Every structure is written in C-alpha cells, then in structure tokens.
Image: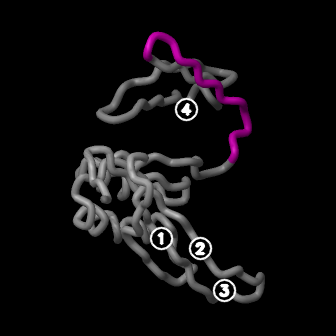
Amino acid sequence: MYKVSQYTCLRIRTGREEKDKNIAKGQSVKVTETANPENRLNLLADIAVKSNNIEDSDILNDRIETLKEKIPPLKELHTDGAYRSEDNDQKFEELGITHIQTAVRGKKNKVEIKIEEREGEYEVSCPLQKVKSKKTRSRYQVCFDKKKSL
C-alpha cells in the first residue's frame, strides 16, 4: 500500500531533446515523482511538457500550486539549481514547502567559500569576510557585506 505521510517530498527529473547549435526547436519534459523513503514504489505526481526555450524556474512556478493540490502533505521539493527563483521561493514559503537544491544556480565562485558548523550555527567565510549564519524559518542564511568584498 502506498503511504502519504507527513514526510512527503517530490523530486523533479528533466528530460530534453538534444539541441543542435543551429536549431532552437525542441521540447523539455519535467517529471515530478514522489520520493518518500518509506515507500518501496514512488509515483509520478506531475508531467509538464514545454518548449525548451522556457526557463525551468518558470515551468515550476506554474506547477507549484498544482503539486500541492495533488499531494496536500507535500513538505519538500528537491530540484537542481535551475528551478530556483525569487517567485518560487515566495510560493514555497506560502505553501509550507521546503525547496532543496542539489546544485546552486549561477556563476562558479572565483574565490573559495568555506562553511564551518559550530554549536548548531554555521560560519561562512571567503578570503575577505567571515559571517555567522542566521536561522530563517526553515533554513540558514548568510549575507556578505558587498563593500568589504570589492
């Protein structure tokens, strides 16, 4: 029997047609499946087929409420960094969903970033600064002083 428990999370897998440098046509398929460790078998929760010129984060933004309607106890959604956006973060917070990224979106750091855990807190440092984390409702956050980093 399939369990929908308090710990229900989803993960998104991406399949897309190979793009040729000269051809911008194609489709992107986003498959969202349950990922509950208590289940021997997980289920497909959502399938979205869109043109491959649409941002992954925009596709997810259109699907977040639908996913929550389909699986009301949804607590976590695992994606790669391409699905993150300010709008998505806001929707996740409103719906009580923790978004877990397996990779961070953006350019590769030009400097080394270190993260150290100390007594339940985190210190994040770069060559010019060391900042203590602040606990938000569901995660930790650090903010570097841009002026000190220049």
Query: What is the spatial separation of the Cα atoms under label 2 and label 1, in whole angstroms?
Result: 8 Å
> As displayed, is residue 41 above or below residue 108?
below
- Residue wearing tag 4: 146
User: Mark 4 or mark 3: which comes first in sequence?
Assistant: 3
Residue 122 has which mark?
A: none
Q: Is residue 40 left or right of residue 70?
A: right
Question: Of helix, strand and loop, which one carries label 4?
Answer: helix
- Residue wearing tag 1: 31
- Magenta-colored span: 108-120
Q: Residue 105, image x and y in percent?
A: 58, 52
Q: Foreground: 94 or 14?
A: 14
Query: What is the spatial separation of the Cα atoms under label 2 and label 4, in whole angstroms?
Result: 38 Å
Say which residue appears at 46% left-offset and 57% top-offset: 11
User: Mark 2 or mark 4: which comes first in sequence?
Assistant: 2
Say which residue appears at 72% left-offset and 33% top-offset: 111
Q: Kindly identify the amino acid type of the residue bearing the numbered disc 1.
A: Val
Q: Residue 14, image x and y in percent?
A: 56, 68
Q: Kindly identify the amino acid type of the residue bearing the numbered disc 2.
A: Gly
Q: Kindly identify the amino acid type of the residue bearing the numbered disc 3.
A: Ala
As for residue 116 lying within the magenta part, the answer is yes
Q: Looking at the image, do the residues carrying marks 2 and 1 touch, with CB atoms under 8 Å apart? A: yes
- Residue wearing tag 3: 24
Instruction: Say which of marks 4 and 3 sits in front.
Output: 3
* Camera sees residue 86: no
